[in-house]
Amino acid sequence: MKMNNLSLLFLTHLTLFFICVCSQNIAQTRFVYKWSETYCNKDTPVGCKQIPPLKFILNGFWGTDSNGNIQQGCRDPEKRDWKKVFDTAMVNKLSLFWPSLTKQDPKDMWKEAWNTYGTCTIERFKTPTQYFNRASRLDSEIGDLLQSHLINSNGIVPCDSATYNNVEILNSFKQVSNNKDVSFTCKDINATHAYLNQVTFCYTNDAKNFVDCPTSVTNKRCRVQNIIVPRPSPPKAIQTTGEKVGPNSLRRFPVNYVKLY
Ligand SMILES: *[C@@H]1O[C@H](CO)[C@@H](O)[C@H](O)[C@H]1NC(C)=O
């Protein structure tokens, strides 16, 4: 009897041990957008296969622990049927805000995002579908706001000769984040000028409500005097490929690009 109790105790401990080891404790989630022109042409150029759209696109969606560390590299307990996850509806949804600008197949990119970061949020998002749907939901809540507050209205004008200071950029983003503290990073040009690179929004662990980003993130905010939101330059591809300029060759460029030029 005594022995049985002991082994029961032992088993309970063993089980608890495994539960602790295997499940990640997500304290917050982060939704990170990047400015596509900086990503394609100003940071370490990555060789974008298309003209960067004049907008923020998703860089990543991940969980952090209570110390603010990004949780990554968890093991997926299940084998996923990716054909089913990335059905037409899902592909259409994700392509809107999370396109691959490089040669990488977007489905491979999304799969990588799940395998690297999504798997660590599994206590909240049980399946890739839940994870991607939540990302899509977040984008539908703030993507348009970002675009209209910052880019399309009297906000921030993407233009290589316009500069904004740290406070102006921060305040624009805070209009989107319900006034919660956000972080943004830059790609430095020199001691006084930098290109806007990424913006991070922080959420509760279920990715439903904004919270202030921790200082470990906001500390890294770019603080140069002059921040530039660069604009994609007009197409050169037409000359280099020797194609005639006409309605057909224009059709290859993203719609919002054509509209703006
Ligand atoms: C820093 O870069 C900006 C933008 O390219 C430029 O206008 C400025 O003159 C540069 N400043 C110095 C000190 O080189």
Image (cartoon, rainbow, N blue to C red):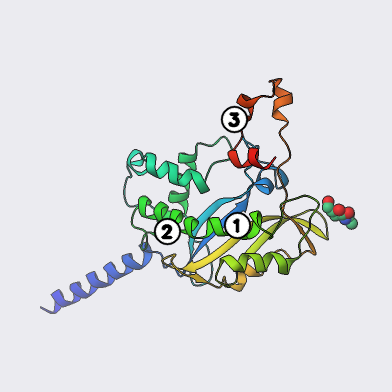
Hey, what amino acid is under mark 3? Arg
**Quadrant hosting residue 100:** top right
Q: Is residue 19 left or right of residue 199?
A: left
Q: Whole-percent x and y of residue 246?
A: 66, 24
Ligand 1, what quadrant? bottom right
Do the CB atoms of the residues marked 3 and 2 lie less than 8 Å apart?
no
Q: Which residue is mark 3?
A: 251
Q: Which residue is mark 2?
A: 120
Hey, what amino acid is under mark 1? Ser
Residue at horizontal 30 percent and vertical 70 percent from the top: 16
Residue 199 or residue 119, whichever sits in front: 199
**Quadrant hosting residue 240:** top right
Quadrant for the N terminus in the image? bottom left
* Residue 220 in view: no
Q: Earlier in the sequence, mark 1 or mark 3?
A: 1
Residue at horizontal 62 percent and vertical 43 percent from the top: 53
- Measure the C-alpha gap from mark 3 to mark 2: 40 Å
Hey, what amino acid is under mark 2? Cys
Residue 148, labelled with which disc? Answer: 1
**Is label 2 in a helix, a strand or a loop?**
helix
Q: Does 255 appear above or below 4?
A: above
Decide: few, some or many residues near mark 2? Use Cα within 10 Å; few <14, some 14-19, many ≥20: many
**Quadrant hosting residue 148:** bottom right
- Measure the C-alpha gap from mark 1 to mark 2: 33 Å
Q: Is residue 220 left or right of residue 64?
A: right
Q: Whole-percent x and y of residue 215?
A: 61, 73
Q: Is residue 16 left or right of residue 226?
A: left
